[in-house]
């Protein structure tokens, strides 16, 4: 029996509806108190009551806005660079709001060459959970990782949930790098976020996640969603 783990973003009262939906449960979680000044402990985490099992979305081969999907080619890595093990779901970095998403991933790269290398994790790149009960992740903003010669580096990537009715993963769930999505509406969201010069704030992150769920598990973006993205 699993317990779905929810994001620190739920500290905002506006997020209560958003995060109670994720995982398929009917019980409303109680909101934790926001940390006071000088707080140095780990971020609060909401735990929903145990469920009899995860609710998986009904089969939908092409949710609105996603388009037909082809098998992914994985991350394109430069010569001498490899993944050290699979990406895994991770705890969030308390000091980095961008990791306070529903699917934070820890990814380790090894550079065995004698030259500095760069790895690019593209915008709109999908990471697939190894267990169907847990959410897949979508990376919205291009991330460039610089690797020193003969070095290993672990990065924490905050990816967004692509499955409203699955569990948010606890730390340690393996993920597979898949592909850049071909979905037109997902690409539109990624473009709007990736083009920003400043990071998203907590309220904007919540709204982006709602829009993604409208695309993947509802009937596609609404007119309000489109207007909000245009103004982002």
Image: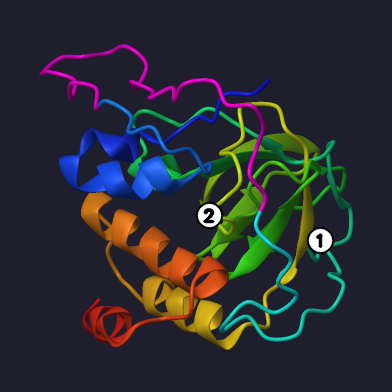
Query: Can residue 199 be seen here?
Result: no
Q: From the image, tell me which residue sits under label 1.
A: 77
Q: From the image, tell me which residue sits under label 2.
A: 164
Q: Quadrant of the N terminus?
A: top right
Give the residue furthest to the left. Answer: 37
Query: Can you tell which quarter of the image residue 123 is in?
Result: bottom right
Q: Nearer the viewer, mark 2 or mark 1?
A: 2
**Residue 114: image location, x then y, percent:** 84, 47
Q: Is residue 137 above or below residue 131?
A: below
**Residue 226: image location, x then y, percent:** 32, 85
Point 59% across, 39% down: residue? 167
Query: Can you tell which quarter of the image residue 72 is in?
Result: bottom right
Label 2 crowding class (10 Å Cα cut-off): few <14, some 14-19, many 20+? many
Q: Mark 2 or mark 1, which has the lower sequence index?
A: 1
Left or right: residue 128 versus residue 165 is: right
Q: Which residues are magenta?
A: 31-56
Q: Main secondary structure of the magenta part?
A: loop
């Amino acid at each position: 029996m699993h317990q779905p783990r929810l994001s620190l973003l739920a500290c905002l009262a506006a997020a209560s509806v958003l995060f109670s939906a994720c995982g398929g449960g009917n019980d409303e979680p109680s909101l934790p108190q926001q940390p006071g000044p000088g707080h140095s402990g780990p971020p609060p985490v909401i735990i929903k009551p145990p469920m009899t099992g995860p609710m998986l979305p009904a089969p939908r081969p092409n949710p609105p806005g996603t388009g037909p999907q082809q098998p992914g080619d994985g991350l394109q890595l430069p010569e001498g660079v490899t993944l050290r093990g699979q990406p895994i779901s991770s705890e969030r970095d308390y000091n980095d709001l961008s990791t306070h998403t529903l699917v934070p991933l820890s990814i380790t790269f090894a550079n065995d060459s004698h030259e500095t290398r760069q790895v690019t994790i593209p915008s709109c790149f999908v990471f697939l959970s190894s267990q169907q009960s847990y959410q897949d992740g979508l990376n919205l903003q291009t991330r460039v990782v610089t690797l020193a010669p003969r070095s290993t580096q672990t990065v924490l990537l905050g990816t967004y949930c692509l499955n409203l009715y699955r569990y948010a993963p606890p730390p340690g769930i393996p993920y597979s790098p898949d592909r850049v999505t071909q979905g037109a509406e997902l690409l539109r969201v990624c473009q709007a976020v990736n083009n920003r010069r400043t990071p998203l704030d907590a309220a904007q992150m919540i709204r982006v996640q709602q829009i993604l769920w409208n695309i993947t598990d509802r009937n596609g973006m609404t007119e309000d969603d489109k207007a909000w993205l245009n103004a982002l």
